[in-house]
Image (cartoon, helix red, strand yellow):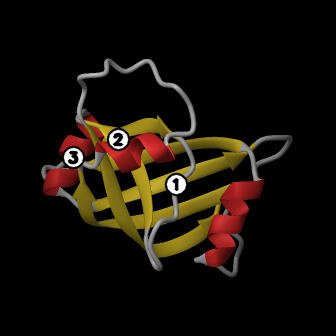
């Protein structure tokens, strides 16, 4: 997991987190790179919106990350939610940018384990 933390600390790009609800209805939303807080887990800060709702009934998600630059380089991370917490102090400390959310909106820190990691464009070996 250390290699992923170093990758996201040094690589600029664009990320999309895809989830599905318990009935299989899919959603995709733009997300910043994950935070690495505990050994073996990565996390995302999210509002109480569709992605958070989907993860209540289906713990699986995929994070697709496209590196800045030419060509198609990046990562696909297949994730499983293991827990969540509503810790405003920790979330404020982790936030990388000032967002346009309303202050009263609930934010959650969602923890995931990494089920599988693939390149953005899979090679024959993957």
Write down the quadrant of residue 52 in the picture: top left
Q: Quadrant of the C terminus?
A: bottom right
Write down the quadrant of residue 8 in the picture: bottom right
Report the residue marked by disc 2.
Answer: 46
- Residue 87 at x, y percent in the picture: 28, 49
At mark 1, the secondary structure is loop
Report the residue marked by disc 3.
Answer: 54
How far apart, in angstroms, are the residues tagged by discs 3 and 2? 12 Å
Q: In terms of sequence position, does the residue under pointer 3 or pointer 2 come before the other?
A: 2
Given contact means CB atoms under 8 Å apart, are the residues at marks 3 and 2 in contact?
no
The answer to whether residue 97 is left or right of residue 41 is right
At mark 2, the secondary structure is strand
Q: Is residue 101 above or below residue 59?
A: above
Residue pictured at 57% horizontal, 43% vertical: 15
Residue pictured at 71% horizontal, 66% vertical: 6
- Residue 75 at x, y percent in the picture: 63, 60
Report the residue marked by disc 1.
Answer: 34
The answer to whether residue 83 is left or right of residue 89 is left
Q: Is residue 8 above or below residue 28?
A: below
Instruction: Residue 18: tell me if it is visible.
Output: no
């Amino acid at each position: 997991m250390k290699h992923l933390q170093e990758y996201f600390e040094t690589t600029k790009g664009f990320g999309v987190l895809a989830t599905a609800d318990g009935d299989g209805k899919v959603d995709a939303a733009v997300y910043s790179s994950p935070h690495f807080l505990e050994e073996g887990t990565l996390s995302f800060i999210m509002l109480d919106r569709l992605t958070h709702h989907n993860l209540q009934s289906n713990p699986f998600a995929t994070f697709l990350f496209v590196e800045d630059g030419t060509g198609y380089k990046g990562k696909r991370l297949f994730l499983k939610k293991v827990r969540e917490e509503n810790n405003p102090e920790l979330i404020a400390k982790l936030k990388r940018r000032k967002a346009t959310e309303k202050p009263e909106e609930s934010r959650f820190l969602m923890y995931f384990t990494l089920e599988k990691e693939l390149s953005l464009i899979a090679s024959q070996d993957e």
